[in-house]
């Protein structure tokens, strides 16, 4: 079992840290939200008054933060966790979803200080975080991956080494770009099905065994009714918030621009999710894009 410092105990980080406690690790966490600290304490973890205090004496340090700017800030600037842990040299794991460049910059700084770091963004949403069934897409040195794999397995079900530094973030950006586009396609299919007089459950049952099948259709249907566990049947409670999906699609567009790749479907998806956010549904699950598209139906 390991001594773990965990920074960022939000909707994803909180249950992830709790699962590490459940697995028998000693976990000390920090978050700016007092309620998040209370939740970790209730799960059996310890809390610290600052990020620096949370990582002192840790063998593994994990961060789960909103964006690249926060990751750079915590590791390199204010807080400067690399300086705090440079003597003890724990394994460093960042599970945030951020731009590839930020991941590589922070990893390079860690390596320069004599430490190993993994970028390990996740897929699976809050349900996967709570149930320890997340998919981890991991970038970094093979040796560092071997050291961190067992820790990641206590928080997830599918652990993949994607390649060198930044590769985990690259996979996550591509994955979420595809999911964002796919969700819109499924939504349009069900809206058209309604207008053609099809029963939603029947349409779902058939398509889930046909060539249109996907995670968005079979497990996360954006149309209310067919999949009882989907956010669509809980007034689009997340799940995975639209604001986060928009952030990830924008990351894909930045990466596409930087590499000269044309992604017109992703560009359209970004504009639609932006409309959802602008309409006040940023905190709803991203499948709420269904309601935006449905509102445009004539008659």
Image (cartoon, rainbow, N blue to C red):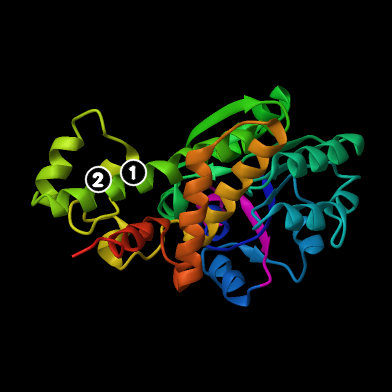
Asked whether 121 or 84 is in front, the reply is: 121
User: In the rendered image, which residue does mark 2 sit on?
Assistant: 189
Judge the density around disc 1: few (<14), some (14-19), many (≥20) Cα neighbours within 10 Å.
some
Judge the density around disc 2: few (<14), some (14-19), many (≥20) Cα neighbours within 10 Å.
some
Contact (Cβ within 8 Å) of mark 1 with mark 2: yes
Asked whether 194 or 34 is in front, the reply is: 194
Residue 200 belongs to magenta span:
no
Please count the marks in the image. 2
Spatial CA distance of label 1 from label 2 is: 6 Å
Q: Which residue is at 55% across, 47% downward?
A: 249
Q: Position of residue 160 (x, y in %)?
A: 55, 29
Give the quadrant of residue 232: bottom left
Q: Which residue is at 25% across, 60% downward?
A: 297
Quadrant assignment for the N terminus: top right
Q: Is residue 285 left or right of residue 222?
A: right
User: In the rendered image, which residue does mark 1 sit on?
Assistant: 185
Relative height, residue 39 to residue 255 (above, below) = below
């Amino acid at each position: 079992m390991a001594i773990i410092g965990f920074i960022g105990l939000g909707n994803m980080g909180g249950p992830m840290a709790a699962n590490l406690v459940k697995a028998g690790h000693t976990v000390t966490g920090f978050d700016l939200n007092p309620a998040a600290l209370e939740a970790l304490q209730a799960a059996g973890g310890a809390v610290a008054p600052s990020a620096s205090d949370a990582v002192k004496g840790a063998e593994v340090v994990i961060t789960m933060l909103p964006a690249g700017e926060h990751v750079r800030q915590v590791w390199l600037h204010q807080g400067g966790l690399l300086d705090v842990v440079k003597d003890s040299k724990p394994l460093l794991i960042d599970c945030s979803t951020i731009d590839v460049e930020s991941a590589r910059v922070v990893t390079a700084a860690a390596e320069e200080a004599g430490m190993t770091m993994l970028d390990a963004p996740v897929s699976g949403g809050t349900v996967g975080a709570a149930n320890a069934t997340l998919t981890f897409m991991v970038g970094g040195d093979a040796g560092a991956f071997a050291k961190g794999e067992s820790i990641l397995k206590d928080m997830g079900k599918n652990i993949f080494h994607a390649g060198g530094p930044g590769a985990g973030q690259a996979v996550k950006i591509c994955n979420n770009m595809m999911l964002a586009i796919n969700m819109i396609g499924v939504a349009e299919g069900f809206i058209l099905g309604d207008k053609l007089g099809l029963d939603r459950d029947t349409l779902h049952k058939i398509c889930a065994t046909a060539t249109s099948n996907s995670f968005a259709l079979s497990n996360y249907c954006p149309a209310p009714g067919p999949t009882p566990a989907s956010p669509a049947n809980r007034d689009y409670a997340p799940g995975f918030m639209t604001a986060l999906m928009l952030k990830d699609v924008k990351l894909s567009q930045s990466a596409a621009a930087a590499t000269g790749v044309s992604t017109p479907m992703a560009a359209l998806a970004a504009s639609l999710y932006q409309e959802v956010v602008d309409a006040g549904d940023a905190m709803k699950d991203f499948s709420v894009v269904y309601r935006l598209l449905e509102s445009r139906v004539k008659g």
